Image: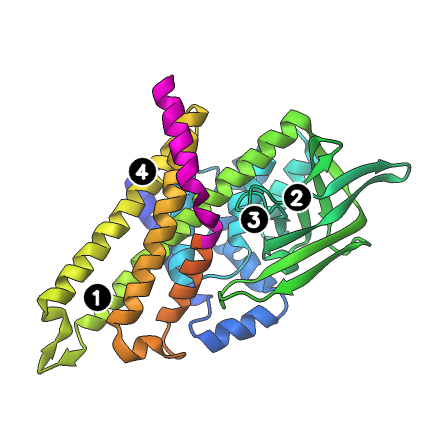
């Protein structure tokens, strides 16, 4: 089990590395979004700190740490507004592949991810939109093919291939579609978040390798969904913490009426409320992480609370940060609007249409009934 001291060391090292390699201005983020995938940074993160392998077993080249360590890394990625493929690869693909660790292809993928030589991106809209249609898997004479459209694929254009949950005649399958496959193409999506790229994946009779079917595929998809929610919630905690730190630093130097605005009682109260909001989100995330191995009603309720609380906290704090920065907070040149944009995007992904409140109610009722 990783110690508190080791977690602090991991947090500090990740913070220094990621912030040094992440664009700092809106213009730089826009330029990075339109540039080819930054494989040098991807490989460097693996070489310097082994971040992609934080959950990958040691025999496959990873460090084999606990979920708590991975979430610390996601927090720091959020605080830095890192826009690379780390979250979908490490937060989604790795948990799914770990459920298939007996499969040699899955083991190879995990080893390549840990080495920083491969970008494996899940293409599944159902983790944030439960009613989204799955692509269809067909077993033809020339082998399996996949057809369908998957919107909102995080870092989809940067992938070496996609893990695609698919409908195989009313049953679930998990397919692997390498980039460059005929019939597979991505289209960039325009979103309010300037720091992260999304794409629509279009598949038309694209040749695929089936990694799992039925119950095994369902377990992989469940791990993918749980991992995505926890990673994004952790990122929201990092966003909220950094937006609050930026604001506290600013109110200590901004003067009005001959004194710094941080001395005004109203500003102090507002910042105290935001700190309580941050710590509430941090607690919800910690409880959800500890509940992953529990029975479904408790696990699902805890995860829904974290999704709802962390997304709302990041948006509230980023929104208030803009107002507390005054006029400069509304300018293109200041970083605070980038936190607002990322926070709003994450909140939508975590709690589309307020569905998490219904999940909480249903699972709490199940807990009491049991």
In this rendering, the label closer to the viewer, 4 or 1: 1
Q: How is the image coloured?
A: rainbow
> Is residue 106 found inside the magenta-colored segment of the image?
no
Q: Mark 3 points at which residue?
A: 89
- The residue under the point 35% across, 76% down is 330
Q: Residues within 10 Å of mark 3 (few under 14, many from 20)?
A: many
Gap between marks 2 and 4 measured at Cα: 43 Å
In front of the other: label 2 or label 3? 2
Establish if 270 lies above or below 224: below
x, y (%) of residue 343? 40, 59
Which label was assigned to residue 133? 2
Task: Point out the tag, 2 or 1, that comes first from the N-terminus.
Answer: 2
Q: In this view, does 139 lie to the left or right of 198?
A: right
- Badge 4 marks a residue whose secondary structure is loop
Per the image, the residue denoted by label 4 is: 3
For marks 3 and 4, the one nearer the N-term is 4
Magenta residues, start to end: 348-370
What kind of element bears circle 2? loop
Quadrant of res 32: bottom right
Q: Which of marks 4 and 1 is nearer the N terminus?
A: 4
């Amino acid at each position: 089990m990783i110690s508190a001291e080791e977690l602090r060391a991991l947090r500090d090292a990740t913070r220094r590395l990621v912030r040094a390699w992440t664009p700092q201005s809106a213009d730089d983020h826009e330029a990075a979004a339109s540039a080819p995938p930054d494989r040098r940074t991807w490989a460097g993160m693996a070489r310097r700190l082994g971040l992609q392998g934080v959950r990958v077993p040691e025999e496959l080249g990873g460090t084999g740490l606990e979920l708590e360590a991975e979430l610390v890394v996601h927090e720091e990625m959020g605080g830095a507004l890192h826009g690379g493929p780390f979250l979908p690869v490490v937060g989604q693909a790795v948990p799914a592949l770990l459920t298939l660790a007996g499969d040699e292809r899955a083991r190879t993928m995990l080893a390549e991810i840990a080495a920083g030589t491969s970008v494996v991106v899940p293409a599944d809209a159902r983790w944030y939109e439960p009613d989204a249609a799955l692509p269809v898997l067909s077993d033809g004479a020339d082998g399996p093919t996949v057809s369908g459209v998957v919107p909102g694929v995080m870092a989809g254009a940067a992938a070496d291939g996609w893990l695609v949950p698919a409908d195989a005649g009313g049953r679930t399958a998990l397919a692997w579609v390498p980039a460059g496959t005929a019939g597979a193409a991505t289209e960039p999506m325009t979103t309010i978040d300037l720091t992260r790229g999304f794409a629509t994946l279009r598949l038309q009779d694209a040749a695929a390798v089936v990694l799992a079917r039925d119950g095994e595929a369902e377990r992989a998809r469940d791990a993918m969904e749980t991992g995505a929610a926890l990673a994004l919630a952790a990122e929201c905690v990092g966003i909220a913490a950094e937006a609050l730190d930026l604001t506290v630093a600013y109110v200590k130097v901004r003067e009005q009426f001959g004194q710094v605005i941080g001395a005004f009682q109203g500003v102090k109260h507002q910042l105290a409320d935001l700190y309580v909001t941050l710590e509430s989100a941090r607690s919800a995330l910690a409880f959800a992480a500890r509940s992953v191995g529990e029975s479904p009603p408790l696990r699902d309720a805890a995860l829904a609370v974290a999704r709802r609380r962390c997304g709302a906290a990041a948006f509230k704090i980023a929104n208030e940060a803009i107002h507390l920065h005054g006029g400069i907070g509304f300018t293109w040149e200041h970083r605070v609007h980038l936190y607002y944009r990322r926070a709003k995007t994450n909140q939508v992904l975590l709690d589309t249409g307020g569905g998490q409140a219904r999940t909480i109610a249903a699972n709490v009722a199940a807990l009491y009934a049991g």
